[in-house]
Amino acid sequence: MLIYYSGTVVPRESETMEFTPLLRSGAANSGILNFDSLIIRNPLFGMTLNNNPRRDNDEFSHVVAARVKSKAADKESGNNPVINAIFVADIDLISDGIFDLAERQSIQALGIEMKLDNIKFVLNCVDSLAGEEDFISLRNRRDDSRTLDWVETLTSGAVEKRSAAEKAARTAEEERLADANQELRDKIAELEKDTTMDELAKLREIQMLQSALSRKVEVDTVDIERESEAEIQAIKASSEREIAAVKGQFRFWAIVLPPLPAILLGLIIGFSRVRNERRMIIDERRVNRA
């Protein structure tokens, strides 16, 4: 399943409906982003998408789609309307881009191959709500391409290392920005406590200091973000090289090892035939080279 910018859905504590989760995110590599973290506000260009927002994983598995049904008692009473619906927290689950990706089954720019189940999921939801269960089991059948557990184990270490390094870089960035802002607040507080200046002069000094330090903080923010982004990109590049090296080793051995049994078998058969032929030669026909 490919979901671009999904929300999450949780049942109310006092709700009497049947709540059945249908789609969940992974518990180990998912989290929640605020809307302000997902966009960049620009006074000239308005809101633009942040292509690399800070992603903090949590330990929860977030429900992306769920089925909501009225309970049997509510249906029999007839007091409340009967509800039988499937809620998906992302309308782009079956957008035009999803159809295009499902047809091509790859993202050529990134070199990623994928088999999307978005369309099958929506069709299964429609059939389930309509009470038609015949085609659901057929759509759920797919080629099961198992990955090598050893490869996943080796590459998962690089991915976890990259995530930890990215989180550390983000934390260091926040600490440096917090220190810069704290410096601004400390200097303003120091001026406010100065009793040798009158209020008007103090106000002018504070405004000048705020303006100067604000520009400094803005410059420092840009520099810190640039350094942090460069560090994160370096971490990603190093992680991708490690993963590519592991895959390259397995690719090399996958090419070299399969023909070895056939080559060894051919050598054994060849040597055995030569030896048998030599045994069948009579002694009178042998050449004495002594």
Image: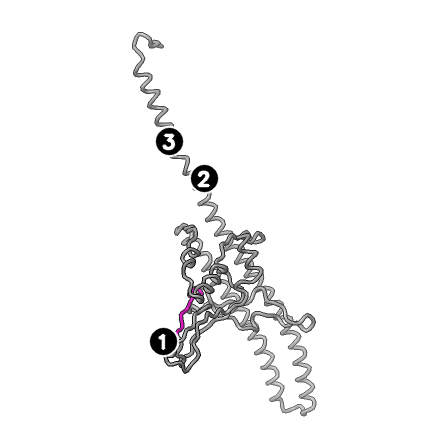
The kind of secondary structure element at disc 1 is: helix
Q: CA distance from mark 1 to mark 3?
A: 70 Å
Q: Is residue 270 above or below residue 123?
A: above
Magenta range: 18-27
- In the image, is residue 22 part of the stretch drawn in magenta? yes
Q: Between label 1 and label 3, give the one nearer the viewer.
A: 1
The kind of secondary structure element at disc 2 is: helix
Q: Which quadrant of the figure contains the C terminus?
A: top left
**Quadrant assignment, res 138:** bottom left
Q: Main secondary structure of the magenta part?
A: strand
Q: Is residue 196 above or below residue 270?
A: below
**Mark 3 belongs to which amino acid?**
Leu
**Mark 2 belongs to which amino acid?**
Ile
Q: How many C-alpha atoms fall within 10 Å of the one at disc 3: few (<14), some, or many (≥20)?
A: few
Pointer 1 residue: 72
Query: Who's the residue at 58% across and 63% down the image?
Result: 229
Q: Residue 159 in the image: state x and y as whole percent.
A: 46, 58
Task: Decide if residue 30 is on the left or right side of residue 225.
Answer: left
**Mark 1 belongs to which amino acid?**
Ala
Q: How many C-alpha atoms fall within 10 Å of the one at disc 1: few (<14), some, or many (≥20)?
A: few
Pointer 3 residue: 264
**Quadrant assignment, res 220:** bottom right
Query: Who's the residue at 49% across and 54% down the image?
Result: 115
Pointer 2 residue: 255
Q: Are marks 3 and 2 in contact (CB under 8 Å)?
A: no
Q: Residue furthest top?
A: 284
Image mark for residue 179: none
User: N-terminal of the two: label 1 or label 3?
Assistant: 1
User: N-terminal of the two: label 3 or label 2?
Assistant: 2
Q: Residue 67 in the image: state x and y as whole percent.
A: 43, 70
